[in-house]
Amino acid sequence: MHPSIALLQELIRRPSVTPDDAGCQEILTQRLRPLGFECETMQFGDVTNLWARRGSAGPVLCLAGHTDVVPPGDESEWHTDPFDPVSKDGLLYGRGSADMKSGLAAMIVALEEFIGTHPDHAGSLAMLITSDEEGRACDGTLKVVEALQARDERIDWCLLGEPSSQESLGDIVRIGRRGSLSGMLTVRGTQGHVAYPQLADNPIGRFAPVLADLYATQWDDGNEFFPPTSFQVVDIRAGIGFPNVTPGELSARFNFRYSTEWNHESLKAKVRSIFDTHGIDYELGWHLSGEPFLTEHGRLIDAIVQAVSEETGSDPELSTGGGTSDGRFISPAGTDVVELGPINASIHKVNEHVRIDDVVALTSMYRRVMELLLL
């Protein structure tokens, strides 16, 4: 059995449902310390984080990821126990197998192989691991980066092991992510009898033209690296459950996935201007998951493209698609961030799985990136 697969199985057996690390980081620490890493546990609230570093000089290449997983859901729908890894037909099944314990296992074994061959490499190697990526993401990577900045510790390059691939390993590499901004809306009206609308003020009717305007707005055309900004309503609630009563209040939640054509303040201002033209009584709160970020072409992207090409025979597509990742917390510190990991088709689903051969190949890719950047 390839050492990456053996380690992956060990990690899957730990039921690390967010934010519980379930001892995964201790397993990683036990592998890193013999390689010369100084390992530091950073605990914030109920979140466990690991910062490990080998070397004191720059540049610093950081391998980053998370040990937490989403809940397995209805376990009766799984073909196997979600926390008992099972190999079948070239696939390894288990919660976290693709997102993203396979990336972590490949990183650890790649580090062992690289340092074993090149113990006197240039610069420094580091790992930043959290148990708070799948949950609130408040006490994980964000807090670690803040702690590193407070003591003037810099990361030059960051390789995230998130499952970026789509059809085949390495076909897509993420070089950035869209921003995510959510709005929490309350529209106030006056409750009344459905037969006497003149005596009431129905917030549904008030909000309807605003909603039409929001959907009709062309927010931007995107740019060279980002698709156009998207607007989606994810929840609308009103009414008291009686067919003859118009509601006195409406609540809604919506989300923007936005490009670098905006920042969160300019986007908020645009939304408010649309609401204000309709003269409705509303209250609007906001939650910023992260601003968009983009890594410009440079040594990190070049190294990853070369590593993928040498392993697969094809150059990857450079993309900013998908949801958010912890790269949104690492990039603002001036770090180049790129994501390369396994196929994402089964992530967060029942019967999550990863191709065994892909984990082995991913290990080789990670090792090659280290060679290209630190030798």
Image (spheres, rainbow, N blue to C red):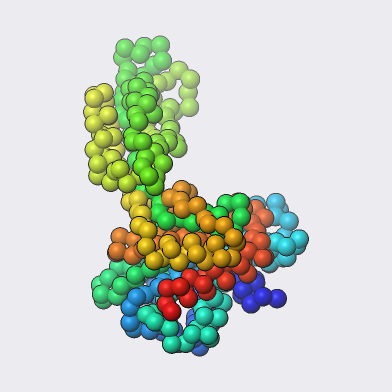
Looking at the image, which is closer to me, 293 or 132? Answer: 293
Q: Is residue 16 left or right of residue 239?
A: right
Q: In which quadrant of the rendered view does residue 109 lie?
A: bottom right
Looking at the image, which is closer to me, 263 or 166? Answer: 166
Above or below 156: residue 297: above
Q: Position of residue 257 (x, y in %)?
A: 39, 43
Above or below 202: residue 69: below
Looking at the image, which is closer to me, 301 or 72? Answer: 301
Q: Position of residue 274 (x, y in %)?
A: 27, 29
Q: Is residue 31 left or right of residue 232?
A: right
Q: Quadrant of the C terminus?
A: bottom left
Q: Is residue 26 visible?
A: no
Q: Quadrant of the N terminus?
A: bottom right
Q: Residue at x 35, y 50 (%)?
A: 292
Q: Residue at x 26, y 76 (%)?
A: 151
Q: In which quadrant of the rendered view does residue 219 lie?
A: top left
Q: Position of residue 120 (x, y in %)?
A: 43, 87
Above or below 216: residue 320: below
Q: Position of residue 311 (x, y in %)?
A: 59, 65
Q: In which quadrant of the rendered view does residue 302 lie?
A: bottom left
Q: Residue at x 40, y 52 (%)?
A: 177
